Image: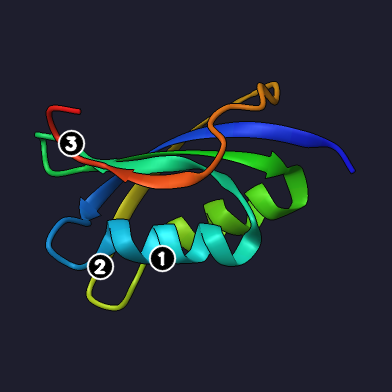
């Protein structure tokens, strides 16, 4: 099973709709590692690591997001698996 890493910028109405918490729950259900955080411009940034087939599922989920979200664009940057981080967490501004 090939592993990888994908960094996303999710644009649209993605703050104030539980996007981060829902992303954390989705990633945990898939067994992915990484993080998600709000950006000051109103978008959401996320990083996922794990098996590529599961990363594709995570990206597909992020294109829709949780109920109440209106995703207009998702930028994807794929790279090699690095083995970091060791869990999936919500990052908060200033951390």
Labels 3 & 2 near each other (Cβ < 8 A)? no
Q: Quadrant of residue 92?
A: top left
Q: Is residue 67 above or below residue 20?
A: below
Q: Nearer the viewer, mark 3 or mark 1?
A: 3
Q: Nearer the viewer, mark 3 or mark 2?
A: 3
Labels 1 & 2 near each other (Cβ < 8 A)? yes
Give residue 77's mark: none
Task: Residue lying at the far bottom in this picture: please name it.
Answer: 67
Q: Could you tell me how far apart the alpha carbons at marks 3 and 2 are, in whole angstroms?
A: 15 Å
Q: Could you tell me how far apart the alpha carbons at marks 1 and 2 are, in whole angstroms?
A: 7 Å
Residue 12, x across and y down, in percent: 22, 53
- Give the secondary structure at mark 3: loop
Q: Residues within 10 Å of mark 3 (few under 14, many from 20)?
A: some
Q: How is the image coloured?
A: rainbow
Give the labeled residue for mark 1.
Answer: 64
Give residue 39's mark: 3
Name the N-terminal-most of marks 3 and 1.
Answer: 3
Name the N-terminal-most of marks 3 and 2.
Answer: 3
Give residue 69's mark: 2
């Amino acid at each position: 099973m090939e592993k990888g890493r994908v960094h996303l910028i999710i644009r649209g109405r993605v703050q104030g709709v539980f996007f981060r918490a829902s992303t954390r729950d989705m990633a945990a259900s898939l067994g992915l590692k990484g993080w998600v955080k709000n950006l000051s411009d109103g978008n959401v940034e996320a990083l996922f690591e794990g098996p590529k087939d599961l990363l594709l599922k995570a990206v597909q989920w992020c294109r829709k997001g949780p109920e109440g979200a209106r995703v207009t664009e998702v930028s994807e940057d794929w790279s090699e698996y690095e083995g970091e981080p060791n869990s999936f967490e919500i990052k908060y501004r200033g951390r």
